[in-house]
Image (cartoon, rainbow, N blue to C red):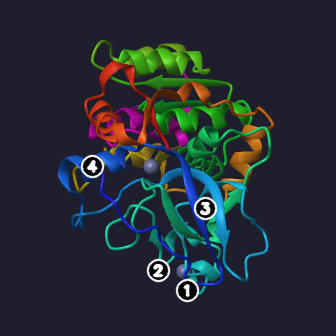
């Protein structure tokens, strides 16, 4: 990884804006590209800028932009849908057939850059009481908010979150905001469990140290309403099926490194378990920003480390190595 000089990009369409970046969070998917050069079939051709959890300040706007002006602080939705295909017309912008996503090879370069050009529609002006760092955190948080909406979580729900990385925490905060009664959180890193507890988890456990299924079912003899798989591990999916009550729902958010999940077909069938995959988020950026603004979600503790732009490699090595209790490392410009 290295810093390179490039020309400041230019607005080429009337509906675009030029942004000066302020904060960019380092995501697990950026780390995949950094360490392996690819995620599944998406392969990086160097040089390539990653980064998709960003916030910045509007520097210039195209001729047809009405909702933004220079100086506005914005959160960036890294998705750039076409607004024309069948998926977009059905309101499923996140599965747009022609989707471009920041920092995805073959689609768009990322926002780990001092300046980027974005469609104005993908930029969300910030209320005064939201910081640019919080705006950058809203990207992973929106995935959690969307997952909670998709799960149709009911007030009083008793749920599990398997994996307490940034996405697990991003599910935990809206789950509590929407009225989950008790949230059981597991992870193999104790520092992450401690943070989850601080942020509202009712129970935490490390599957390397205890039988988390047995321990949770001791507390919840009627089993859990929903389990959110947030680590992409087969053993977590197996635990989820055992933890769920009949009619329960497994929400799959984690990105596994393997290509096939397996499930206990007998238990899954007898319990009539519903499995729902979660693909990023759809149309909840505003809702997420409002929840932060209104204090319903308080994400600041997620941001455990801060780096200046010229130390970006250190940030990536820290996150790649799960060092120093890192949850979210933030790059500042
Ligand atoms: Zn991400
Ligand atoms: Zn589309």
Question: Of the residues under marks 4 and 3, which one precedes in the sequence?
Answer: 4
**313 in magenta:** no
Disc 4 element: helix
For the residues bearing labels 1 and 4, Cβ distance under 8 angstroms: no
Q: Is residue 237 inside the magenta stretch?
A: yes
- Residue 250 in the image: above or below residue 317: below
- Residue 255, can we see it? no
- Sooner in the amino-acid sequence: mark 1 or mark 4: 4
Total count of labels: 4
Q: Is mark 1 within 8 Å of ligand 2?
A: yes
Q: Is the residue marked 2 within 8 Å of ligand 2, measured from its CB? A: yes
- Nearer to us of marks 1 and 4 is 4
CA gap, disc 3 to disc 2? 14 Å
Q: Residue at x 51, y 30 (%)?
A: 160
As helix, strand or loop, the secondary structure at mark 3 comes to loop
Specify start and end residues of the magenta stretch as a single range.
221-248
Q: Closest to the observer: 122 or 298?
A: 122
Q: Which mark is residue 97?
A: 2
> In this rendering, would 221 be left or right of 153?
left
Report which residue position mark 3 lands on: 282
Q: In the image, is 273 to the left or to the right of 315?
A: right
Q: Residue at x 59, y 87 (%)?
A: 84
The mark that comes first in sequence, 2 or 4, is 4
Circles 3 and 1, Cβ within 8 Å, touching? The answer is no
> Image height check: is 73 above or below 115?
above
Mark earlier in primary sequence (2, 1): 1
- 267 to the left or right of 303: left
Front in this rendered view, residue 94 or 223? 94
What residue is at 43 percent from the left and 29 percent from the top? 327
Q: Position of residue 75 (x, y in %)?
A: 64, 53
- Residue 32 is labelled as 4
């Amino acid at each position: 990884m290295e810093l390179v000089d490039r020309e400041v990009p230019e607005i080429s369409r009337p509906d675009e804006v030029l942004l000066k970046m302020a904060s960019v969070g380092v995501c697990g998917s950026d780390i995949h590209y950094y360490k392996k050069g690819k995620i599944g079939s998406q392969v990086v051709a160097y040089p390539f800028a990653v980064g998709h959890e960003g916030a910045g300040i509007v520097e210039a706007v195209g001729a047809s932009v009405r909702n933004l002006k220079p100086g506005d602080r914005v959160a960036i939705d890294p998705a750039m849908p076409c607004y024309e295909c069948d998926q977009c017309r059905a309101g499923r912008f996140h599965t747009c057939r022609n989707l471009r996503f920041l920092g995805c090879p073959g689609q768009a370069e990322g926002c780990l850059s001092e300046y980027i050009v974005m469609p104005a529609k993908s930029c969300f002006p910030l209320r005064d009481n939201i910081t640019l760092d919080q705006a950058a955190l809203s990207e992973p948080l929106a995935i959690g908010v969307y997952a909670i909406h998709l799960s149709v979580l009911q007030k009083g729900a008793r749920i599990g979150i398997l994996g307490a990385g940034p996405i697990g925490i991003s599910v935990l905060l809206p789950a509590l905001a929407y009225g989950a009664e008790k949230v059981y959180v597991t992870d193999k890193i104790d520092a992450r469990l401690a943070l989850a507890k601080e942020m509202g988890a009712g129970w935490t456990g490390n599957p390397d140290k205890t039988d988390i299924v047995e321990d949770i079912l001791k507390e919840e003899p009627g089993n859990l309403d929903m389990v959110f798989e947030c680590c992409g591990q087969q053993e977590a999916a197996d635990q989820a099926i055992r933890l769920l009550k009949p009619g329960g729902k497994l929400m799959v958010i984690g990105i596994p490194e393997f290509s096939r999940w397996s499930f206990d077909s007998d238990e899954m069938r007898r319990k009539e378990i519903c499995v729902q995959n979660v693909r990023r988020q759809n149309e909840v950026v505003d809702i997420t920003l409002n929840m932060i603004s209104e204090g319903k979600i308080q994400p600041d503790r997620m941001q455990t480390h801060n780096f200046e732009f010229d130390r970006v490699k250190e940030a990536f090595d820290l996150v790649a190595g799960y060092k120093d209790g890192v949850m979210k490392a933030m790059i500042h410009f």
